[in-house]
Amino acid sequence: MDFEDFDEELFINDDLDILDIVEFGFPRKVYERKNAFDELDDLSFFRRFRLTKNTILYLLEMIEDHLEYDNNLNNSVAPIDQLLCTLRFYASAGHLATVADFIGMDVSTASRIVARVTLAIARLYPQFINMPTQYELTKTQTDFYHIASFPRVIGCVDGTHVRIQSPGVRILKFLEIVKDTFQSMFKPLVTQT
């Protein structure tokens, strides 16, 4: 077989591949999903998902009904994998491509799963979020005042301080203007009006 015959055969094979795509569509990619729940030890698991295995099983028990599919067509994602995908998304600062690669699915699938599981978790708010009574508000404000002489505080949110290099005087003046503009938006969150 000389080079011309090989070149012609290559083009014929390419044409046949294109005809197959036209007739049958693009071939589907079937991902192999790793079983992170069973494969990872407890410490590695906690580092990747920020929750223990027992906590995840407890959460899964509460939302599993909202995550199950009616059938197992098209390699559907199991509820535990959906929950792990979402928790990995929360723990990894929201990089869907990284999460999808880690779990073993396409980015668009991971995106839909994160939205679906987030909604299922949000539905649990009545069981875990209670607004305080007037007595509890007053007591909390008094307690905060006794601890730190900080008046009218009704709660705290955890956070992290990160040291940054000064962006310069112009940026600092801008941030000061923004802080003054938006300060009133934050007051209702921490004080009683």
Image (cartoon, rainbow, N blue to C red):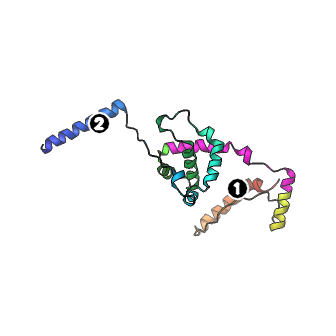
Q: Is residue 175 left or right of residue 189?
A: left
Dot 1 alpha-carbon crowd within 10 angstroms: few under 14, some 14 to 19, many 20 or more = few
Q: Is residue 87 magenta?
A: no
Please state which of the two labelled residues, at mark 1 or mark 2, is closer to the viewer.
2
- For the point 66% across and 43% down, which residue is it? 62
> Residue 120: which quarter of the image?
top right
Residue type for callout 2: Asp
Residue type for callout 1: Phe
> Residue 29: which quarter of the image?
top left
**Where does the image place residue 191, in percent across and percent down from the top left?**
80, 56
* Residue picked out by circle 1: 182
Secondary structure at numbered mark 1:
helix
- Placement of the N terminus among the 4 image quadrants: top left
Q: Does residue 147 show up?
A: yes
Dot 2 alpha-carbon crowd within 10 angstroms: few under 14, some 14 to 19, many 20 or more = few
User: Residue 156 got which mark?
Assistant: none
Q: Is residue 135 above or below residue 79?
A: below
**Where does the image place residue 47, in percent across and percent down from the top left?**
57, 59
Q: CA distance from mark 1 to mark 2?
A: 59 Å
Foreground residue, 177 or 46?
46
* Residue picked out by circle 2: 17
- For the point 62% across and 38% down, which residue is it? 66
Q: Residue furthest top?
A: 23
**Where does the image place residue 186, in percent across and percent down from the top left?**
73, 55
Nearer-N-terminus badge (1/2): 2
Secondary structure at numbered mark 2:
helix
Q: Does residue 95 show up?
A: no
Q: Is residue 115 left or right of residue 138?
A: left
> Residue 161: which quarter of the image?
bottom right
Foreground residue, 185 or 96?
96
**Where does the image place residue 145, in percent across and percent down from the top left?**
83, 64
The magenta-colored residue range is 109-138
